[in-house]
Image: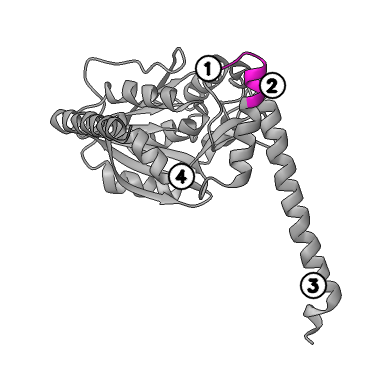
């Protein structure tokens, strides 16, 4: 027997597996309980992640990180015709400054007032020509000339609770863009609807119903971060793809790891009408099938 495969080592590996399973289930139960007991509005002080608006905000370290390799890849491949870029969830200004340093005219919008103010101070200290403004959650300010591209920063799309709200945010972004403009976003991922994700959603919704809170039910894939009160959504790709399409975007490239990123482009108006017509036709066909089966 190999010295690293003794009976003791085998039992150690089994106990480590059991410990990890127990920890993941304990985390899922805790997540389900508190998503059910705490109001959505209370989590919004923490959806500025990795910042925390309940404390003094310092964004200098985040800004210094600069653009990540996947973001630079997207800029090289998809921003060849872009001059103006909108950054949504721009607090911390990492993406805002990084794109500005590459020569783009960058404008940021942030929904956390304290984070926006700290970010504005950082831009002033750096003498950056990028700008950032605060907005009512989840509004996207429009300008006279549409933007050539948009970044949804800090995996912010995963921080938006409820599919309806996410699609509304994407539609608001769409209205600020020129035709065929690229949309870039990062997001948390899950491989499938595991039992742990289904259980915590079911537990949270039972508690919400008992409290009389039925709006914006917890979705399968919603989760509370074990290290902060960050309420976020883990996507399977098919789910995000459909939300993008419903909001008027066509996905063109994506990659999935422990987090994912995607690039989508604004659909031409005629394609959006065709998609909606197809959806309506499918709904009518489904309704007819129900009538015939009854």
Q: Name the secondary structure under disc 2.
A: helix
Q: Report if the CB atoms under discs 1 and 2 are less than 8 Å apart.
A: no
In the picture, the disc for residue 10 is 3
Judging from the image, what secondary structure is the residue with disc 3 in? helix
Q: Quadrant of residue 139?
A: top left
For residue 287, the mark is none
- Per the image, the residue denoted by label 4 is 236
Q: Earlier in the sequence, mark 1 or mark 2?
A: 2
Quarter of the image holding residue 251?
top left
State the residue in front, 245 or 262. Answer: 245
Q: Is residue 258 above or below residue 100?
A: below
Q: CA distance from mark 4 to mark 1?
A: 23 Å
One can see residue 53 in this view: no
Q: Nearer the viewer, mark 1 or mark 3?
A: 1
Q: Tell me if mark 1 has few (under 14), some (14-19) or many (20+) residues whose alpha carbon lies within 10 angstroms of its own.
A: few
* Distance (Cα) linking label 4 and label 3: 34 Å
Q: Which label's residue is closer to the chain start, 1 or 3?
A: 3
Q: Which residue is mark 1?
A: 215
Q: Residues within 10 Å of mark 3 (few under 14, many from 20)?
A: few
Q: Earlier in the sequence, mark 4 or mark 2?
A: 2
Magenta range is: 206-214
- Whole-percent x, y for residue 123 in the image: 47, 24
């Amino acid at each position: 027997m190999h010295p690293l495969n003794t009976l003791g080592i085998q039992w150690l590996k089994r106990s480590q597996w059991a410990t990890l399973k127990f920890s993941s289930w304990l985390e899922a139960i805790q997540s389900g309980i508190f998503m059910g007991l705490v109001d959505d509005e209370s989590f919004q002080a923490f959806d500025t992640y990795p910042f925390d608006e309940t404390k003094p905000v310092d964004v200098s370290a985040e800004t210094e990180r600069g653009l990540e390799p996947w973001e630079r890849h997207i800029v090289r491949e998809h921003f060849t015709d872009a001059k103006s870029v909108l950054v949504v969830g721009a607090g911390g200004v990492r993406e805002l400054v990084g794109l500005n340093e590459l020569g783009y005219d960058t404008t940021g919008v942030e929904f956390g007032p304290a984070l926006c103010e700290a970010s504005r101070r950082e831009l002033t200290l750096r003498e950056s020509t990028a700008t950032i403004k605060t907005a009512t959650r989840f509004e996207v300010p429009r300008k006279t000339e549409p933007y050539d591209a948009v970044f949804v920063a800090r995996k912010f799309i995963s921080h938006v609770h409820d599919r309806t709200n996410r699609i509304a945010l994407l539609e608001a972004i769409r209205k600020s863009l020129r035709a065929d403009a690229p949309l870039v976003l990062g997001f948390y991922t899950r491989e499938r609807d595991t039992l742990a994700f289904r259980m915590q959603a079911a537990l949270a919704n039972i508690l919400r119903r008992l409290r009389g809170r039925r709006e914006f039910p917890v979705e399968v894939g919603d989760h509370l971060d074990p290290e902060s009160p960050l309420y976020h959504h883990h996507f399977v790709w098919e789910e995000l793809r459909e939300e993008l399409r419903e909001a008027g975007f066509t996905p063109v490239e994506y990659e999935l790891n422990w987090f994912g990123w995607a690039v989508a482009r604004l659909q031409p108006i005629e394609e959006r009408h065709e998609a909606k017509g197809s959806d309506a036709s499918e709904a009518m066909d489904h309704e007819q099938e129900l009538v015939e089966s009854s």
